[in-house]
Amino acid sequence: MGVIERREREKENRINDILDAAEKVFFAKGKDKASMDDVASAAELSKGALYHYFKSKENLYFGLNYRALNILEKMFKKAIENKKKGFDRVKAIGEAYFNFYKQYPDYFSVMSYFEVNKIDLDVNDPFMKRYHKKAKQTIKILVSALMKGKFDRSISSNIKPLKSAIVLWGQMTGVLNIIALKGERLEKDFNIKQEDIINHYSELMSKILAP
């Protein structure tokens, strides 16, 4: 291994160590209460060394969001492995998203922050660029499932795959956010469980996508 390759590997290892520390801090305190000093302390770095890799908390959040999307992408791919029909793949992707929310609530919170807040960062920021690339890869799995459904006629031919994928993503994220924020109240006041809401959403989407 050459000098350049070794330095790049060391840099990536340091970045991962910092993100490991950021996870502990952000997941324990929340983004608003956590500070760069907290992350530097958890990573056993000086604040100056931390800023050498990450310029702000938003940079760190982009790094964590990339990790979240990486997990979600793998769950999507796993969910559709044995599904032949496009509609079945779309449904499996929705179920995988719900499972992601249940298994990785802290990562879901990180993702949700970016869904509902406008983040202004340099478009050339490497963490922002890596995050957007992963986001495109993840949404393409849903787009491909919708395209396949149109082809095998398990989904309406009127569906526009890319636009529909964006709408479905937004709707599912919104539903999961409602569950995360209001789930206990909904169950107490109306005796509606999380699974009931997800199942009903799935039923509604099935009718919309039906050929």
Image (spheres, rainbow, N blue to C red):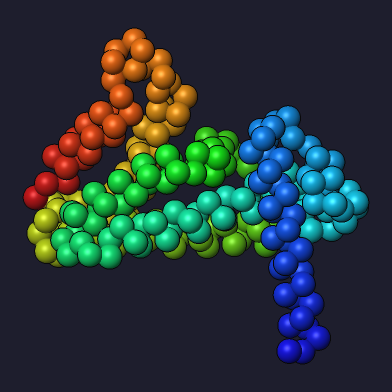
Q: Find the residue positioned furthest to the top.
A: 189
Q: Is residue 50 visible?
A: yes
What residue is drawn where x is 73% and y is 49%? Answer: 21
Q: Which of 58 and 193 is in front in this view?
A: 193
Pinpoint residue 115: horizontal percent, then vertical percent. Answer: 51, 40
Which quadrant of the rendered structure holds the N terminus?
bottom right
Q: Find the residue positioned furthest to the bottom.
A: 2
Residue 135 horizontal side relative to residue 30, left or right:
left
Is residue 56 shown above or below 8? above
Residue 188 horizontal side relative to residue 35, left or right:
left
What residue is drawn where x is 84% and y is 45%? Answer: 41
Is residue 102 shown above or below 85? above
Residue 100 horizontal side relative to residue 14, left or right:
left
Q: Nearer the viewer, residue 89 or 170?
A: 89
Is residue 54 shown above or below 198? below
What residue is drawn where x is 87% and y is 53%? Answer: 45
Pinpoint residue 68: horizontal percent, then vertical percent. Answer: 53, 51
Pinpoint residue 96: horizontal percent, then vertical percent. Answer: 34, 49
Q: Can residue 138 be seen in this view?
A: no
Pinpoint residue 127: horizontal percent, then vertical percent. Answer: 66, 58
What residue is drawn where x is 59% and y is 62%? Answer: 130
The number of discs equals 0
